[in-house]
Amino acid sequence: MKEKGIEPTLVVYTTLVDSFYKKGKPEEAGKLWEEMVGSGIKPDLTAYNVKAMYPANNGKPEEVREVMEEIETAGLKPDAITYNYLITCYCKNGRFEEAKEVYREFMKKHIDCNAAMFKMLVQALCGNGDFDGGLEVCRDSMKSNKIPDFRTMKVLVEGLVKGGKVEEAKEVISVVKERFPENLVGGWKKLEKQLGLSADGQEPEEVEAA
């Protein structure tokens, strides 16, 4: 482009940096970033989120936090996507308590939470056996009307029942049945019977481990 006298724009640079990161070429992405900044183009929040994505999936939370510091130094504010990357990174590194701390910090700031964060965190916490933590996030998702999908919620409900928290499991099913489309209610009714939560008094069936 430069050979033809066309200067790359922020959008072009961001797209190329994103492409290199997704191809597992962080060094090339880093060089393009330096070229972009060196040419006087100021990264916007979208560009910074692209930069945060690679360490979120392949590095340490501290690396994602460094990008967040860059965002704030630039006079911008991390958004739901930025925090989602940070929380994801903590979970990938097995640091679930810190992930929950960051999530609570995020919620206190009243930043609009996206459905992807709720789903990812419920899955991660339940996968680690923290069904209480999963329930906390689930309740927040209900308040925001961004409830995760059936598969994710099914694992949470099964875990709550196995942990003796039957009322909490019923609470989740009750709310979800009201908000999911009618064609998915049948799945919840079947799950209620399996877990012995239905009103017909049937004995629970044996539930497979999550």
Image (spheres, rainbow, N blue to C red):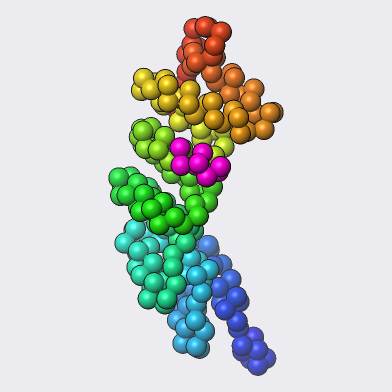
Q: Which SS type dominates the magenta stretch?
A: helix
Q: Residue furthest right?
A: 183
Q: Closer to the camera, 78 or 32?
A: 78
x, y percent for residue 149: 57, 37
Q: Closer to the camera, 105 or 25?
A: 105
Residue displayed at 51% across by 74% down: 44
Q: Quadrant of the C terminus?
A: top left
In this rendering, the answer to whether 199 lies above or below 3 is above
x, y percent for residue 194: 52, 15
Residue displayed at 37% across by 37% down: 133
Q: Is residue 128 left or right of residue 171?
A: left
Q: Can you see residue 114?
A: yes
In this rendering, the answer to whether 44 lies above or below 53 is below
| Quadrant of the image occupied by residue 30 | bottom left
Q: Quadrant of the N terminus?
A: bottom right
Q: Is residue 32 left or right of residue 58?
A: right
Magenta stretch: residue 48 in it?
no
Magenta stretch: residue 144 in it?
yes
x, y percent for residue 77: 44, 68
Residue displayed at 61% across by 34% down: 179
Q: Is residue 205 left or right of residue 71?
A: right
| Quadrant of the image occupied by residue 82 | bottom left
Q: Can you see residue 26?
A: no
Residue displayed at 53% across by 62% down: 22
Q: Closer to the camera, 56 or 156?
A: 156
The span picked out in magenta is 139-146
